[in-house]
């Protein structure tokens, strides 16, 4: 069966393999979490150290813990630390939202862009720039959230119209329709307004540069609530992976689980896209890597995705600064170059497409 056929087969899909159990497997997964935490600390330190302005590591380490008001201290504390924290939040949000999307739709190719959520955020920013004259990243954030909310509600209403409940297949079709409409709307507005197009193209490439603590503070509560909902839903997602009917037989409220999951995706993806612009492949590829390591148990898949995604995103941001020196390449460009071949290689392993 092809990937696409398996993605839309719904109830006919083969039940997910039982997760590996036993103390040995749990110990290995716990060790893997510690390794990921270590990798996250390492890339975060690199992100604070590496930049367009060369600063010795000893000086970076010194002012990191003892800010003294010097130029080096200002660069570290006012520019690089908020950028690193934003990369952490955006990465966690993208990784978790991608894993949630794939679990809720039982579609291994699902990512936050599939249901029109990313384009909803883009539409909000387009409206803000073209019709309201908003010109700052902090101003984009709220309109991107509004666009995400409108797109999510539209997809859910279309996917659950009539007496039918929202099923993965209906949500995917509704998401494709909303995506097409929003795509046409965005480009119609931008092509008729060259000034808005020029301003929008810097946001849409996906970047962590030029964001400060104010943006971090704005998205932090949304990411925290979305993260909490996602982790609480993990056991229910394991039951949902076996199909709606089996899930109901196990006592699962399928509609409530799917609605809460959609809210979490909206909060996580909306916050990430609003703060950094659309960043591709992180939400798509990272859950596959996590599933390859820990198997189909959603409790571990979500946890690993939450840690692995910021490692990839912050690492890509650092790589963009090194490759683009004395300037830098936006993180959205680097993740596309890294994520595409990684995802193709993962898809060639048949086991990875089984949710």
Image (cartoon, rainbow, N blue to C red):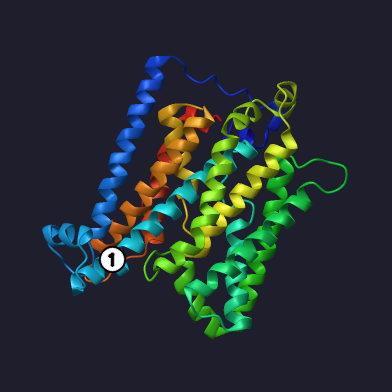
Q: Which residue appears at 58% of the width and 24% of the height?
A: 16
**x and y, in percent, of residue 255 in the image:** 74, 38
What residue do we see at 43% from left, 14% from top?
22
| Within-10-Å neighbours for mark 1: few <14, some 14–19, many 20+ | some
Q: Kindly tell me whether residue 49 is visible in this rendering.
A: no
Give the number of marks. Answer: 1
Q: Residue 246, relative to residue 88: is it above or below?
A: above
Quick check: 23 left or right of 194?
left
**Quarter of the rendering occupied by the C terminus:** top right
Give 284 or 240, whichever is nearer the viewer: 240
- Looking at the picture, does residue 92 appear above or below residue 116? above
Q: Mark 1 — residue? A: 77
- Image position of 2 with respect to 281: above or below: above
Front residue of 277 and 37: 37
Q: Residue at x 14, y 58 (%)?
A: 57
Front residue of 148 and 200: 148
Q: In the rendering, at what x and y percent does residue 265 appear?
A: 59, 49
Q: Quadrant of residue 151?
A: bottom right
> Helix, strand or loop at disc 1?
helix
Q: Position of residue 190 (x, y in %)?
A: 59, 78
């Amino acid at each position: 069966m092809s990937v696409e056929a398996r993605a839309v087969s719904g109830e006919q899909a083969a039940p997910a393999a039982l997760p590996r159990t036993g103390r040995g497997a749990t110990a290995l997964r716990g060790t893997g979490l510690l390794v990921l935490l270590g990798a996250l600390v390492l890339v975060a330190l690199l992100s604070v150290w590496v930049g367009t302005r060369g600063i010795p590591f000893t000086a970076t380490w010194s002012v990191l813990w003892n800010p003294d008001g010097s130029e080096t201290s200002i660069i570290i504390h006012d520019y690089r630390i908020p950028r690193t924290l934003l990369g952490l939040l955006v990465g966690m949000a993208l990784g978790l939202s991608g894993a949630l999307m794939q679990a809720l739709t039982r579609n291994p190719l699902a990512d936050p862009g599939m249901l029109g959520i990313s384009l909803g955020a883009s539409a909000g920013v387009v409206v803000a720039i073209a019709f309201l004259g908003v010109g700052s990243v902090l101003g984009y954030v709220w309109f991107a959230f509004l666009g995400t909310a409108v797109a999510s509600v539209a997809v859910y209403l279309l996917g659950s119209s009539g007496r039918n409940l929202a099923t993965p297949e209906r949500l995917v079709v509704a998401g494709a329709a909303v995506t097409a409409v929003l795509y046409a709307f965005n480009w119609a507005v931008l092509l008729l307004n060259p000034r808005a197009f020029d301003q929008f193209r810097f946001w849409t490439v996906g970047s962590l540069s030029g964001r400060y603590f104010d943006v971090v503070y704005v998205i932090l509560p949304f990411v925290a609530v979305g993260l909490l909902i996602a982790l609480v839903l993990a056991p229910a997602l394991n039951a949902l992976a076996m199909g709606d009917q089996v899930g109901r037989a196990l006592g699962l409220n399928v509609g409530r689980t799917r609605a809460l999951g959609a809210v979490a995706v909206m909060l996580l993806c909306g916050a990430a896209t609003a703060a950094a612009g659309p960043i591709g492949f992180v939400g798509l590829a990272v859950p596959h890597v996590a599933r390859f390591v820990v198997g189909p148990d959603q409790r571990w898949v979500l946890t690993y995705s939450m840690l692995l995604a910021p490692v990839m995103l912050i690492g890509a941001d650092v790589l963009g600064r090194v490759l683009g020196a004395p300037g830098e390449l936006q993180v959205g460009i680097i993740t596309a170059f890294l994520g595409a071949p990684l995802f193709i290689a993962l898809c060639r392993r048949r086991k990875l497409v089984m949710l």
